[in-house]
Amino acid sequence: MTSLRRRLFLLLISATATIWLCAVGWIYFASRADLEHVLDTRLQEAARMVHSMVASSDMETGGATAASVADFTYNRQLSCQVWSLSGLLLARSGGAPEGNLAEEMEGFSDRRVNGEMWRVYTVVDSLHGVRVAVGDRVGLRARLARDLIVGLLGPALMAVPLLGLMIWASLGRG
């Protein structure tokens, strides 16, 4: 026959573990959504900033080449490309892929470039005849989200055994 202490312990630890698992799931999905929103906002702001730099410069869209235009320095995680509306690459950051990141339409898109998925924000400026695309690798975003969750799970995984010990000790005293 199982002792009352053991039955209460199993009941309480099961309830606690279930609540913790639900909380971890909630944190995971909420944090991932918030992180995606922050990263998308960053893409949007970077694209608009590069667009304002391009629009304020005297960049010639007809004869410029990628090598002759100043290299934008978003090569850490963000990659930037500036295209003429006629399809000529005018400038790109050091980390940008050779393939075209830009969509024809303005806004967000997910694109496969050189076998890799990218999240891209595109600004189209008909007045200046340019298309600015800023993107980051979906794999980097997923790794960032995973690292965030692992960082949150560490304390949770340490807390559950401590909570179990406290429940066991409390039941023994009770």
Image: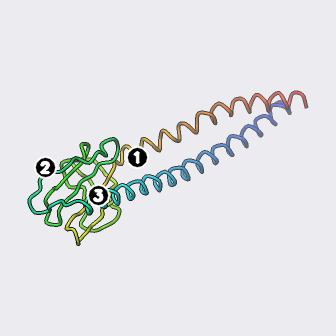
Q: Residue at 38% across / 59% down in the picture?
A: 44
Residue at the spot of label 1? 141
In the rendered image of this protein, does residue 96 appear above or below residue 153? below
Residue closest to the eye, 22 or 82: 82
Looking at the figure, which quarter contains the C terminus?
Answer: top right
Q: Residue at 80% across / 31% down in the picture?
A: 6
Residue type at mark 3: give it: Met
Q: Earlier in the sequence, mark 2 or mark 1?
A: 2
Q: Position of residue 97 (x, y in %)?
A: 22, 47
Tell which residue pokes out farthest to the right in this image: 174
Residue at the spot of label 3? 53
Looking at the figure, which quarter contains the N terminus?
Answer: top right
In the rendered image of this protein, does residue 26 appear above or below residue 128? above
Residue closest to the eye, 29 or 96: 96
Regarding mark 3 in the picture, which secondary structure is present there? helix
Label 1 crowd (10 A; few <14 / some 14-19 / many >=20) = some
Horizontal arrangement in the rendering, residue 66 relative to residue 29 (left or right): left
Label 3 crowd (10 A; few <14 / some 14-19 / many >=20) = few
Q: In terms of image quadrants, where is residue 10?
A: top right
Spatial CA distance of label 2 from label 1 is: 31 Å
Tell which residue pokes out farthest to the bottom in this image: 127
Residue type at mark 2: give it: Ser
Residue at the spot of label 2? 68
Q: In terms of image quadrants, where is residue 53?
A: bottom left
Label 2 crowd (10 A; few <14 / some 14-19 / many >=20) = few
